Structure formats: structure tokens, C-alpha cells
Image (spheres, rainbow, N blue to C red):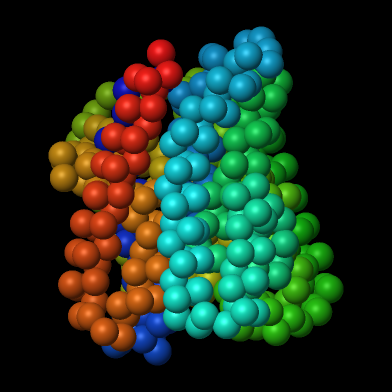
Amino acid sequence: MPKQIRSFSGLRFIAAVIIFLTHYFTQIGGAPNQYLANIANFGYVVSFFFILSGFCMTLGYSNKFQECSRQCTLSFLKKRLKKIYPIYVLSNIIVCVILIVVTPTTKNIAISLACLPVTFTFLQSITVVHPIMLNSPSWFIATLFFCYLATPWFLHKTQGISIKKSIVGLLTCLGIIMLQTAAANAMDYKTPLDHFCKDASFWQSFLYTNPCSRIFEYLIGCFAASIMMQSKAPKSKALMSAVEILVLLVTAFAFFTGSFDYDSVNMRLAYIPAILLLIYSFAYDKGVISNLLGNKVLVYLGNLSMAFYLLHFPAIAIGAKRVNGFLLFFITVLVSIATQALIQKLFSSTTKNGK
């Protein structure tokens, strides 16, 4: 793997905080003002995570799959599972226990326990029946795993791909997303099961969580990384600082003015170019904003972003109407730190015992 792009860690944590705000405001009945309501937009953030994941996987593994052998593929998937699976399982068990304790009816216990096999095998991501999800945000991890399954094959097939072909691949993925969105809008079948978008159709809900849709965002990130690796890196720190500031101002303006419609599948076509610009601006880690995002505190918190993302939902469900929002946020961060430390300790001791 190349050296860590530190600014990405800071961006990950900020993105996770936006998702926290979205779910928190939903739980308490709305944001206190329109500006915060505009910022709390996880539609943009979810697409950001998928594109950034593809981007980082390509930067880190582009030369590792010259031969797409079974051993290399299994090694890659084992590393990915080791990182995502323990906290994924734990967060869903926590939610299952909460559901059983809060409403201990026979029916509720049966449904909660029945959800576990679907969740643990990542199958929750291929259904639009959202109530079967235990920890609702964990669908992202399940869908991301299916993207990981395709990564070794994709990186092997795109070895040595030119910038021109990478651009064609990126635009093709964007075109497929456009066609999927148009098809979902044409098949306007409403479903009362959806809780992501009030006005979403059955097929829009399907596109929101399903790997067959989100993988194209992931691949856009892969193609973007391929283009970057073959391009000349800018040498001027002043220029990169100016670009970073400009992109940040434009992104902030879009959020504050509500230009990015709340959590809409249709708005992905607007999200994606903006996300690519944001990622490219910080990928070189050279500007003044990159230095701020790459400070030790944000890098540490960024490394906790997955634990924070998966644990924030049960924390909000329990404490949103009992605890002040700022206090709940810090409690969630502390719980994430403790949980991550526990998992790392358990796995390091397991590894040592297994040698």
C-alpha cells in the first residue's frame, strides 16, 4: 500500500459526522434551522464513501493483481473482512439486543433473530425490504463487500489501462447510473416500506442500497484513481492550496444553499462530478487544507470513522430524546474508540495464539 493520504482520513470523519447529524435530526423531528438541514445530507456522503473506497483500493492494490490468482484474491478479501466484519457484526448484535429488550414480544424476538443470518451474510444489501435490516446504516458495509468481491478481477483486467480508456470507463459508469435512474423513475411503483426517501419509488429504493447500482460509483472511483496515477502531479503547493479552498467553498455553498437535494437518488448525477473534484483536490495532500485535515486528531478520528458510522445509529436510537446532541456525539465517539480498541486487542491476541 502507498503511504496514507492523511487528508482523506479527515474527510472520512467529517462525512461520518454529517451522517450522524442526518440521523440525529431525523430522530428528534428535524434540524433546528434550514442551514443545518441542508448540511445534514447523507445522499452526497454515501456516494462520497463509495467513490473514495474505489479510489483508495485502486491506489493501494493496482499493482497487486497482475495475476488474479485465487491466493491473491482470498488474501485481499481476508484483509478487507478483518477490517469491516467484526464491528459490522457487533453493531448489528447490539441493535438486535436493543430491539428485543425494548419490545420483548415473541413476534419481535423472532423477527430480530431471523434478521441475523441475512445480516451476517451481507444479504441485506440486495433487498429493498428495509425493515429486515437491524442496524440500518450497515447496508453500506454489506454493499461495499460486494464491491470488494469484484475488485481483484477489475484491477487485473484494467492493468496498464490508458488515461483515455479510463475516461471512457468512468463516463460509461456514469451513463449506466443515468440509465438506471431513468428506469427507476419510469417504473414509479411506490412502496410503504421505504424510509430513506419519502417520495422514492420501489426501484429508487432498490438503486439506493443494491450493489448492482452502487458498484458503478465504486468503479468511478477506481477509474479516477487510474487517471490520477498516470497524470503528472502538480508541484506547486500554493496552486493546490488555492484549488482546495475553491473546491471547499463551492461544496460548502452547495450544502448551505440546499443545492444538493436531500438524499435523492436522482441527484447522484450532480453529486458524482462534485465528489470527484473534491477527492482529486485532496488526493495529492499538498495544500493548506490538506494539512489541516491531515492533523493527528482528525487522522485518528478518521481511522475510527467506520466504528463511529456503525455505532452511531443505535446510540441515537437510545439517546436522541434523552441526551443533548453534543453530549450524545461525544459519547458515540468515546464508545467507538473503546469498541475499536477492544476489537483490535481481541484480533491481535487471536493472531498471536494462531501462530
Residue sitting nearer the eye, 315 or 271: 315
Residue 272 to residue 188: above or below: above
Q: Is residue 102 left or right of residue 7?
A: right
Which residue is pictured at 50% across the width and 74% down the height?
A: 100
Residue nearest the observer in this picture, 271 or 64 = 64
Q: Position of residue 284 (x, y in %)?
A: 33, 31
Quick one: quadrant of the N terminus? top left
Q: Is residue 239 visible?
A: no
| Residue at image point 36% right, 64% down | 312
Residue positioned most to the right: 187
Q: Quadrant of the C terminus?
A: top left
**Residue 270 appears at what percent x and percent y?**
55, 61
Of 118 and 284, nearer the camera is 118
257 displayed left or right of 120: left
Left or right placement of residue 236 versus residue 203 in this view: left
Within the image, what quadrant is residue 172 found in?
top right
Does residue 12 show up?
Answer: yes
Q: Position of residue 247 (x, y in %)?
A: 34, 52
Above or below, 302 against 101 in this view is above
Q: Residue at x 65, y 47 (%)?
A: 121
Instruction: Residue 202: name its quadrant.
Output: bottom right
